[in-house]
Image (tube, rainbow, N blue to C red):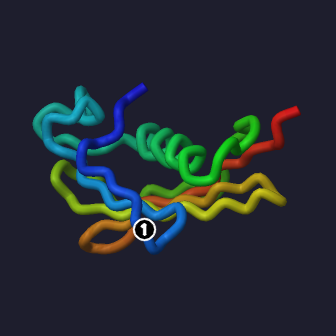
Amino acid sequence: MIPFPQALKALPSTPGGYSLLVEPGHPAFSGHFPGQPVLSGLIQVDWAARLGQEAFGPLGTFQGLEHLKFQAPILPDEPLELHLDWVPTTGLLRFRYHGTHGQKSRGTLVFTAAP
């Protein structure tokens, strides 16, 4: 499990909102890609799921991803905001990463209620 960046803060006025900045030496950039680090999509999804559980409590059993789109690379030291929207009646956790120059990625994680 890749740790969260040190510069991760919940946005107090926005439930499910976070500001973050991934420092250049963060393990999330290890090997992806040498000489031109980019935050992988897998890590973006993992952080969204883990922070969703932190913000909204147990989400249920993970079932899959929908509407996943990576629009621009996330680079080291880039200020970001992550916005999470949880719809418990449908088991959908929507996420959006937004950077200085617009939206970086978005998608929906699908969960079913735990038995």
Location of residue 28 in the rendering, given as x and y in whole percent from the top left corner:
29, 34
- Residue sitting nearer the eye, 98 or 34: 98
**100 vs 18: above or below:** below
Apparent side of residue 104 relative to residue 91 in the rendered image (left or right)? left
**52 vs 71: above or below:** above
Find the residue positioned furthest to the front: 12
**65 vs 30: above or below:** below
Location of residue 49 in the rendering, given as x and y in whole percent from the top left corner:
56, 44
Location of residue 16 in the rendering, given as x and y in whole percent from the top left corner:
52, 61
**Residue shown at 65% from the left, 55% from the top:** 93
- Residue sitting nearer the eye, 48 or 39: 48
Find the residue positioned furthest to the left: 35
Let me know if residue 14 appears in the view: yes
| Residue 62 falls in image quadrant | top right
Let me know if residue 97 appears in the view: no
Q: Quadrant of the N terminus?
A: top left
Apparent side of residue 72 relative to residue 68 in the rendered image (left or right)? left
- Residue sitting nearer the eye, 88 or 29: 88
**Residue shown at 35% from the left, 32% from the top:** 3
**Residue shown at 42% from the left, 68% from the top:** 12
Location of residue 85 in the rendering, given as x and y in whole percent from the top left corner:
61, 64
Q: Quadrant of the C terminus?
A: top right
**Residue shown at 46% from the left, 64% from the top:** 17
Residue beneath disc 1? 12
- Residue sitting nearer the eye, 17 or 69: 17
**49 vs 73: above or below:** above
- Residue type at mark 1 is Pro
